[in-house]
């Protein structure tokens, strides 16, 4: 499997906030806000003094930037920032990796992976999942003005991403007749924009972000509701899992995750929401 790793060190500011309140993050955390108190929980991180996070770019709305060095905002990015804040760690380091290497448990020396990862039983054999933080839905994108419909989508030139649950779903459940599997999100959306495939499918959040960034070249045409849970991934047997799970659960309960979703996903989606996307039957 191909693995591309880049690092970004982001200094954690000294700003402290009272529980249940938010403040602007210090320089180095981009546009993120910090919620809750600093250092309420503690782990022994994979690399001393930092939270190391595996990601998969591009991920518009989740990690806004073309490379780890340029990420300044996003729902999952600011979620990682706030995890680090509550753990009292002084910086966050992002590592970009292929999605299939993430779910196969091939990466080392990291604390958590955040890449809109669906929880599945086979994956549990090689990685540990965090407490879920959202529910997934499969989104479909095509060239604007195209003729892919709910009725003919199975016959279209269909694309999805390697390593995702959508490969087997497209084959076994949707029964797509002409399926192409791409190594990464960028290549997949480049292919549909160029007309090499008629339609592509990935997590609806990513589809909404990529379509908004296409400046009218692409359109969101539908979604399949699967009811799957989205969670982070830890290295198998990670001692940090119960602590970070508690942090995520606390952020869910105190409204931090809901605020991050509203703050960073809605603008990246160009005014469209999941509720605006037609639900297709399968």
Image: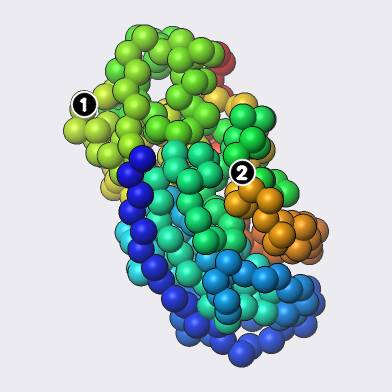
* Disc 2 element: strand
Residue 247, compared with residue 129, is above or below; it is: below
Which residue, given by chain and number where applicable, does mark 2 sit on? 127
* Disc 1 element: loop
* Residue 233: mark: none
Residue 82, compared with residue 230, is above or below; it is: below
User: Residue at the spot x=70%, y=61% of the render?
Assistant: 240
Q: Nearer the viewer, mark 2 or mark 1?
A: 2
User: Residue at the spot x=48%, y=33% of the render?
Assistant: 164
Residue 108, compared with residue 189, is above or below; it is: below
- Left or right of 231 on screen, residue 163: left
Query: Looking at the image, which is closer to me, 29 or 224?
Result: 29
Instruction: Please state the horizontal and vertical placement of residue 157, each as a whole percent of the image.
Output: 30, 18
Query: Looking at the image, which is closer to me, 230 or 216?
Result: 230
Which residue, given by chain and number where applicable, does mark 1 sit on? 196
Residue 44, compared with residue 270, is above or below; it is: below
Q: CA distance from mark 2 to mark 1?
A: 34 Å
Query: Looking at the image, which is closer to me, 9 or 157?
Result: 9
- Label 1: how many residues lie within 10 Å, few (<14), some (14-19) or many (20+)? some
Query: Looking at the image, which is closer to me, 212 or 72?
Result: 72
Instruction: Please state the horizontal and vertical placement of residue 132, each as a whole percent of the image.
Output: 70, 46
Residue 25 in view, yes or no: no
In terms of image quadrants, where is residue 110? Answer: bottom right
User: Residue at the spot x=50%, y=56% of the render?
Assistant: 108
- Label 2: how many residues lie within 10 Å, few (<14), some (14-19) or many (20+)? many
């Amino acid at each position: 499997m191909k693995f591309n790793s880049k690092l970004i060190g982001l200094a954690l500011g000294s700003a402290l906030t009272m529980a249940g309140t938010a403040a602007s993050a210090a320089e180095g955390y981009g546009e993120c806000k910090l919620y809750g108190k600093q250092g309420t929980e503690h782990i022994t991180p994979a690399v001393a003094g930092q939270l190391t996070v595996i990601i998969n770019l591009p991920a518009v709305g989740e990690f806004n930037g073309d490379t780890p060095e340029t990420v300044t905002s996003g729902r999952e990015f600011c979620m990682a920032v706030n995890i680090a804040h509550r753990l009292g760690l002084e910086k966050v380091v992002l590592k970009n990796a292929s999605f299939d290497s993430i779910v196969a448990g091939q990466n080392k020396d990291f604390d958590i992976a955040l890449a809109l990862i669906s929880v599945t039983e086979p994956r549990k054999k090689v990685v540990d999942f965090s407490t879920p933080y959202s529910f997934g839905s499969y989104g479909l994108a095509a060239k604007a003005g195209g003729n892919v419909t709910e009725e003919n989508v199975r016959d279209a030139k269909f694309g999805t991403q390697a390593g995702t649950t959508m490969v087997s779903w497209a084959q076994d459940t949707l029964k797509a007749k002409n399926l192409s599997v791409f190594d990464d999100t960028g290549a997949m959306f480049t292919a549909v924009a160029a007309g090499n495939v008629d339609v592509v499918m990935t997590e609806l959040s990513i589809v909404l972000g990529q379509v908004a960034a296409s400046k009218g070249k692409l359109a969101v045409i539908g979604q399949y509701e699967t009811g799957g849970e989205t969670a982070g991934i830890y290295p198998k047997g990670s001692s940090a899992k119960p602590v970070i799970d508690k942090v995520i659960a606390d952020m869910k309960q105190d409204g931090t995750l809901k605020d991050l979703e509203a703050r960073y996903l809605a603008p990246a989606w160009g005014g469209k929401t999941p509720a605006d996307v037609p639900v297709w039957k399968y």
